Structures are given as C-alpha cells and as structure tokens.
Image (tube, rainbow, N blue to C red):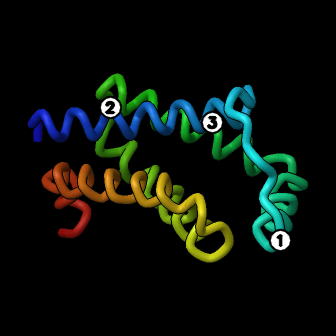
Amino acid sequence: MNSMFTKIARIVLGLLLLIFGANKFLHFIPMDAPTGSAGEFMNSLGATGYIFPVVGILEVMIGAMLLLKKWVAFALILLAPISINILLFHMFLDIPGISIALLIVIINSILIYKHWQQYKPLFY
C-alpha cells in the first residue's frame, strides 16, 4: 500500500483536486463556457447557488486529505461519486474534456483497489 506508485498517484490526485477545487472559488484557470447541452446543464447547476461551492469545498478537502495522507480511504470513498459524475458529464455532454475526467476516475479506482483491505469490513 505504500509503494512509490501509490504515493505518486495519491499526490497527483490530491493536486488535481486541490487545483480544480480551488479554481471553483478563485477562478485562476481560465475556462471557456461550455456550449449546447453542457452549457445549459452547467448554467442550471450554477443557478442553484450551492452546487459548485459544495463540490469545490469537497474537492479541496479531499485533495488536502490525500496530500496530507490523512484519512485516505475515507477521502477516496468521498471522491468516488464526484469522480463518476465528472466522467459521466464529459462522456455525455462535453467529450473534449474527458481526458482529465478519465485520469481522475482511473487514479481513484487504483487507489481504492490499493486500500481495499480497509473497505473489507463494510462488506461483512
């Protein structure tokens, strides 16, 4: 569980989440507004006033937990539904942005597999 690969994967995932989560508040990465169905969907979510701040806070918290190596198994399970939704959004509404979404899902899946011993009690 403490291999160099796992450590690098955890750090990369933590940095991605920290950067993209903080960007939801600070807007330091210029992003083009999505068009078509993706734009309508994002505008609807933004109109609620709470979805993006909540997701941003969760991404920053999960990224920090991964980088600080605190409650890693818990952080990975918290991230699972977020990463799946990111992937599904890009699969169905915004194909050009799917590379980062795939990277997040793949790294999250690998790390969950590497920490599987900690999840076993949930299934007995």
- SS category of the residue bearing label 2: helix
In this view, 89 is above or below 70: below
Which numbered mark, 3 or 1, is in the foreground of this view? 1
In this view, 118 is above or below 90: above
Type of amino acid under label 3 = Ile
Are discs 3 and 1 less than 8 Å apart at CB? no
For mark 2, what is the residue?
11
For mark 1, what is the residue?
36
Picture coordinates of residue 5 (x, y %)?
16, 39
Q: Nearer the viewer, residue 16 or 32?
A: 32
| Distance of label 3 from label 1 (alpha carbons) | 27 Å
Are discs 1 and 2 less than 8 Å apart at CB? no
Lower position in the chain sequence, tag 1 or tag 2: 2
Which image quarter holds the C terminus? bottom left
For mark 3, what is the residue?
57
Give the crowd class for mark 3: few <14, some 14-19, many >=20 residues within 10 Å: some
Type of amino acid under label 1 = Gly
| Distance of label 2 from label 3 (alpha carbons) | 18 Å
Residue in the picture at 86% in, 58% down:
43
- SS category of the residue bearing label 3: helix
Give the crowd class for mark 2: few <14, some 14-19, many >=20 residues within 10 Å: some
Lower position in the chain sequence, tag 2 or tag 3: 2
Question: Left or right: 124 with respect to 51?
Answer: left
Residue in the picture at 47% in, 57% down:
99
